[in-house]
Image: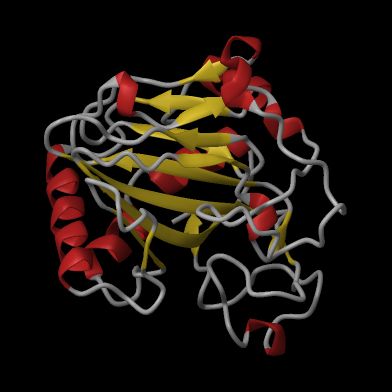
Amino acid sequence: MTLVDEQTVEDYRRDGVVCVRGLLDPDEVEWAREAVADVLEAPGPLAQVASGADDPGFFIEDFRRWRDLPAIGDLALHSRAGQVAAELMRSPTVRLFHDHVLVKEGGTTQRTPWHQDQPYYNVDGRGVSAWIPVDPVPEGGCLELVAATHRGPWLMPRTFLDGEARWFPEGSLQELPDIEADRAAYDIRRFEMEPGDAIFFDFLTVHGAPGFPFAGRRRVLSLRYLSAEARHAPRHWRTSPPFDGLVDELDDGASMDHPLFPVVWPA
C-alpha cells in the first residue's frame, strides 16, 4: 500500500519539496515531544546553541540521538517517514542517515540562513529530509524552501553565525544568491503546519528559516534518509554532523551498508 499519491511524487521530483499532512499520528507526536524534552534535559555531545548571546530567545539543535533515545529510534526506524521517503525518491531501499532535533523558543530572532544540506554531509547521491514539528507552526514561523533548487548546483556551505567556509575551500563552489534581498524573485514554499505534519525536501533544496516571534516554541524532529544510490564520500574536514572513524570502516564510494545507517524500507 502506497502512502503518497503519484501527483505528490511528481511534485516532489519537480520541486524538491512537498508537505505531507498527518505523517505522525497523535501517539507518535507525543513520543516525539517526550524525546525532544529528553534532548533538552540532557543534550548530546553534538548539541549546539545556534543563537547569539544577545538573542531574546534561544535556538538549540542536537544530532544523532536515535541510538540512545528509544522514542527517536522508534520514529526514525518504524514510523511512516521511511516509506514516504522511499516513495518520493522512487528508491527500492531507504536507509536512515541521521536525526536532528531543532528547538526555537518563542521570541527567538536568529534566522537559520539559507543553505543546502548536502554540501555539509559525507555522502553523495540522493537523500531526503522530513521536517516534522510537534507544535503548531504558523506560516510566518515555518521552514522556507526554494522550489527546484534540488537540481543544483551545489552551493558554498558556510557556518551559520559567522559565515566561515569551513568545508569546501573558498572559491571552489558557487555562492548562494542573496535571496532575502529579492524574495519575490524566488519560488519560496512555506506552510502553516499542525503537529505531525511533515515537509519532505531533497538534500540539495535551498532552505532557511525565520526566527520565531510567536508565543510558545517551535520544536522539530527532522529525520534524514538515504536512497539506494547514496555512497560514502569522505571529506577532508569535519562534516555536519560528524561521523568520526567512519572512513576507517567504509571505503570512499562504498554503499552506506553500516550499522549507523540501518535499512528502514522495506521494513
User: In the displayed image of the protein, which residue is found farthest to the top?
Assistant: 184
Nearer-the-camera pick, 58 or 222 = 58
Quadrant of the rendered structure where residue 81 is? top left
Q: Which residue appears at 42% of the width and 52% of the height?
A: 223
> In the image, residue 60 lies at what x, y percent?
31, 58
> In the image, residue 135 lies at what x, y percent?
18, 37
Q: Which residue appears at 65% of the width and 59% of the height?
A: 164
Q: Which residue appears at 57% of the width and 77% of the height?
A: 243
Name the image quarter holding the N terminus. Answer: top left
Q: Answer above or below: position of 178 versus 240.
A: above
- Specify whether 119 is left or right of 136: right
Nearer-the-camera pick, 152 or 50 = 50
- Specify whether 90 is left or right of 125: left
> In the image, residue 94 lies at what x, y percent?
56, 53
Q: Answer above or below: position of 54 versus 123.
A: above
> In the image, residue 37 lies at what x, y percent?
15, 60
Quadrant of the rendered structure where residue 131 is? top left
How was the colour assigned to the protein in this rendering?
A: secondary structure
Q: Answer above or below: position of 242 versus 211.
A: below
Q: Answer above or below: position of 3 versus 35.
A: above
Count of residue discs? 0
Is any atom of residue 89 visible in this view? yes
Nearer-the-camera pick, 196 or 180 = 180
Q: Which residue appears at 59% of the width and 77% of the height?
A: 258
Is any atom of residue 10 visible in this view? no
- Specify whether 209 is left or right of 54: right
User: In the displayed image of the protein, which residue is found farthest to the front?
Assistant: 54
Name the image quarter holding the C terminus. Answer: bottom left
User: In the displayed image of the protein, which residue is found farthest to the right?
Assistant: 172
